[in-house]
Image: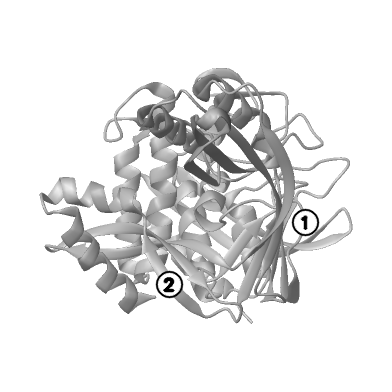
């Protein structure tokens, strides 16, 4: 059976220190994590960590692990690229394996990209405020160290819906609605459901969101079939009246190698349409989150040429997909059925590759059989074309090189 982990953040959301503490509570080596956290100060000028330790506490009747963290930082605003360089140096000094290093760097990059989008600035020039202190590096490095120690980065990981809280937030740019814009940009286009939660306060932080988005493949409404082995509870610093400020991590083995979900299958027939229109429709439906789009040419009544359009989509996206289907295809109606799907395990993993002595991170879809054995890998073609454009090498050749390295590492 394959290893499986569930990050449960549906009650109290998620922050970097809470995830890290939950992983330590679940069995990660606390001394390794502490030493890794202290290493962060050596590469971020002006910062000094005076305490990084883990303590057992009881909150709302739950025994949990909590990070005790104290630091001083004379610099209150740094460029995102400076934080990235400091994190890279720390990863190298700690000797992270390639997958752990890629996870850590992708997490900080996601935060920087979100801030760059919000402020309309370039990745290399945007400044960070709340995420510019050594505690951000400590959260990322500590979580990465714990994940590596538990050998979880090669496992299937999912989360529950993400509680974000409500109300208003006051930060360096004034008063904003909660969740903050950085949270929304981090989760944009990813398969995570955000929920308000039980308080008008910030429950999920940008660092916690970026760690989760790079770690789990999606959020699910119900726990998957799992044989529990380890359970960890990580407590945050805030206190709430009605619930424990705790994130829970469950680690176990997948009880079934085949997953099941429910999707909507939409069908319609369109005549008086061109191939170009159908191509544009496929693109628009894909951007809206359709799982699959199939268009089949045929002949309908009165011998008219037609296209049969079939779209598979999550229930939550049904209205959005129908809106695009009606507006872009010109159809006057559509047939919708709910269907159960049985799905072989698959995951998107980040694999480091080197081409012409230049390192790249490539997203790879990994497919498994009913016994959990890897039966196929497929690099994301967008990554292939990006590398091809950068190096001036044909995409076909880049794909060959990447496949050779991916098959060796997975």
**115 above or below 107?**
above
Residues at badges 2 and 1 in contact (C-beta under 8 Å)? Answer: no
Going by the image, does 212 lie left or right of 341?
A: left
Name the residue at the front extreme. 302
**Mark 2 → mark 1, Cα distance in angstroms:** 27 Å
Give the residue drawn at x 64%, y 54%. Answer: 18
In this view, the residue in front, 74 or 323, is 323
Residue drawn at (63%, 71%), measured in percent from left and top?
Answer: 4
Residue nearest the viewer, comparing 284 with 192: 284
* Kind of element beneath mark 1: loop
Q: Position of residue 331 (x, y in %)?
A: 58, 23
Badge 2 is on which residue? 376
Q: Can you identify the residue that label 1 sits on? A: 222
Residue lying at the far top of the rendered structure:
174
Is the residue 391 above or below the residue 62 in the image?
above
For residue 154, say whether it is visible.
Answer: no
> Helix, strand or loop at disc 2?
strand
Query: 296 or 236, which is in the foreground?
Result: 296
Identify whether 23 is placed above or below 17. below
Q: In this view, does 295 lie to the left or right of 218?
A: left
């Amino acid at each position: 059976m394959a290893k499986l982990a569930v990050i449960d953040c549906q009650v109290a959301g998620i922050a970097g220190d809470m995830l890290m503490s939950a992983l330590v509570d679940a069995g990660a080596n606390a001394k390794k994590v502490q030493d890794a956290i202290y290493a962060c100060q050596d590469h971020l000028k002006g910062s000094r960590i005076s305490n990084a330790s883990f303590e057992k506490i009881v909150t709302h009747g739950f025994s949990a692990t909590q990070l005790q963290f104290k630091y001083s930082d004379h610099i209150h605003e740094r460029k995102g690229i400076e934080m990235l360089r400091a994190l890279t140096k720390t990863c190298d000094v700690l000797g992270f394996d390639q997958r752990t290093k890629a996870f850590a760097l992708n997490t900080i990059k996601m935060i920087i990209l979100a801030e760059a989008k919000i402020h309309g600035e370039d990745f290399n020039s945007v400044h960070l405020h709340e995420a510019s202190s050594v505690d951000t590096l400590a959260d990322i490095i500590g979580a990465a160290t714990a994940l590596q120690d538990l050998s979880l980065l090669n496992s299937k990981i999912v989360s529950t819906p993400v509680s974000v809280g409500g109300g208003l937030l006051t930060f360096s740019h004034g008063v904003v609605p909660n969740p903050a814009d950085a949270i929304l940009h981090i989760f944009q286009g990813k398969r995570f459901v955000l929920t308000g939660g039980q308080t008008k306060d910030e429950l999920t932080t940008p660092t916690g969101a970026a760690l989760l988005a790079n770690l789990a493949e999606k959020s699910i409404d119900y726990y998957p079939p799992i044989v529990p082995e380890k359970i960890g509870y990580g407590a945050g610093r805030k206190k709430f009246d009605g619930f424990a400020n705790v994130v829970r991590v469950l680690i176990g083995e997948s009880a079934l190698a085949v997953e099941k979900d429910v999707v909507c299958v939409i069908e319609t027939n369109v005549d008086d349409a061109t191939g170009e229109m159908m191509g544009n429709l496929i693109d628009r439906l894909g951007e809206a989150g359709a799982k699959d789009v199939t268009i089949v040419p045929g002949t309908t009544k009165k011998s008219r040429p037609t296209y049969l359009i079939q779209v598979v989509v999550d229930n939550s996206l049904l209205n959005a997909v129908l809106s695009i289907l009606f507006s872009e295809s010109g159809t006057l109606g559509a047939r919708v059925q709910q269907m159960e799907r049985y799905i072989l395990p698959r995951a998107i993993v980040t694999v480091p590759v080197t081409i012409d002595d230049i390192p790249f991170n490539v997203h790879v879809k990994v497919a498994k059989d009913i016994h959990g054995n890897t039966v196929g890998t497929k690099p994301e073609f967008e990554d292939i074309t990006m590398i091809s454009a950068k190096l001036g090498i044909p995409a076909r050749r880049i794909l060959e090189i990447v496949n050779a390295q991916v098959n060796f590492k997975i």
